Image (cartoon, helix red, strand yellow):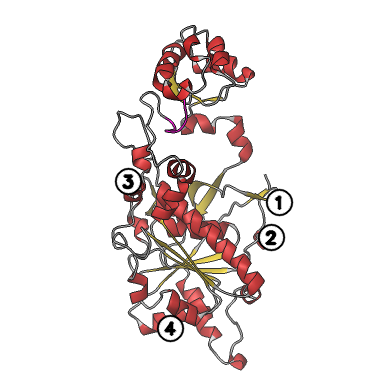
Amino acid sequence: MNVLPQSERPLDGLVVVDFSQFLSGPLCGLKLADLGARVIKVERPGVGDLCRSLYLSDTDIDGTNSLFHAINRNKESVTADLRDADDRAVLVELIKSADVFIQNFRPGVIERQGFGYDDVQKINPLIIYGSISGYGEEGPWKDLPGQDLLAQARSGLLWLTGNADHAPMPMGLAVADMLAGNALTQGILAALVGRGIHGRGALIQTSLLEAMIDFQFEVLSTHLNDGQRLPQRSGINGAHAYLGAPYGVYETKDGFMALAMTPSLKVLADLLEISDLEPYFDDPKLMMTKRDEIKSILAAQLVARTTAEWLSVLQPADIWCSEVLDWVSLRETEAYKRLDLEQTILRNGSVPLETLRAPIRYNGATLKSERAAPGLGANRDAIFSELIASQKPDHENESPISTPGAEEART
């Protein structure tokens, strides 16, 4: 697929000042960068974003862990000591030139540093200020660690996932961080559109908990309108607490198969050559009330043949089903290859980083980018020099700071 040039990306010319670290805030910055924004990370001297040294595995890329590279590609980095008056003065100038500000500290931390929303809004009244907390800015949980697994636990997601007789089960990735980062991106993009309409800046706030609750809005709506009864997780092949048989994941002779929707239980039973399901044909409610019994019968038959054999029978009959793939087998599929999701980025011109592009296409082109994650403070001298030069009187300023389109984007 074609790669969309930077000049044609919708946020080209916008400047984002990103004080955030770890995953949720930097994920928002990554999404904005892929859409064309200039994202400048502000990091602590000597330490930087703590995610630089937080290792998911022993995979090291050019001295930094793979997680940091994945989240922070396509950005610039400056270091600033917030206790240093000169650094603070330059940051103020940077904020004046920016369109978006991002932070994800615990409530009160950024305010004590003098860069809370009220402070930043005075510096730049048209700023779009994006903030992620763990559990909101008020209430008894506001000072608790805003960490992904803890947010999953408090949100009900762990309790909801897995079989009825299993312990609460977390998702296999940092879903709270990623959903919160995407929610903040959505809010910031809406605020940028709004600013173009009415000419006002905005404060956009979300939290890990709000993102996790929103993630469950469909089933929570059922709960709230169903006498607030709690759903019962399936005891067999659990996949969705509110859906009846056959919905679930079943073992086959050589792997696993996901089985979702069927025109009717009778159609499925005939295709699978199962006679024991006949007592459940007449009443559709039995697919929920007798969910585990039906699933047990299905499971005993599905294990007799390979996944490919069952798919060849079920898919032509419009039974919604799928093989269960790991990453290796997924990447070998033609469907995956056609999407052109992967990209290779060179760090320092020689160290390769295999990563993924943004998951959207714009006018038929992908949003790949060749810029790797920045070294700590790699762009400090260039950016600060531009800002200092911009403060000189016009007749002394031969090379003003270059933030293409920033003023136009704010009007």
Give the residue pinned by disc 3: 153
Front in this rendered view, residue 146 or 93: 146
Q: Amino acid at mark 2?
A: Glu
How many other residues sit within 10 Å of disc 1, few (<14), some (14-19) or many (≥20)? Answer: few
Instruction: Give the magenta range.
Output: 239-244
Q: At numbered mark 2, what does the secondary structure look like: helix, strand or loop? A: helix
Q: CA distance from mark 3 to mark 4?
A: 41 Å
**Disc 1 secondary structure class:** loop
Residue corresponding to mark 4: 89
Give the side of residue 245 with respect to residue 311, left or right: left
The verdict on residue 258 being magenta is no
**Residue where numbered disc 2 is placed:** 8
Q: Which residue is mark 1?
A: 363
Q: Amino acid at mark 4?
A: Ala
Q: Amino acid at mark 3?
A: Ala
Q: State yes or no: discs 2 and 1 in contact (Cβ < 8 Å).
A: yes
User: From the viewer's perspective, is the residue at label 3 or at label 4 nearer?
Assistant: 3
* 299 w.r.t. 375: above or below: above
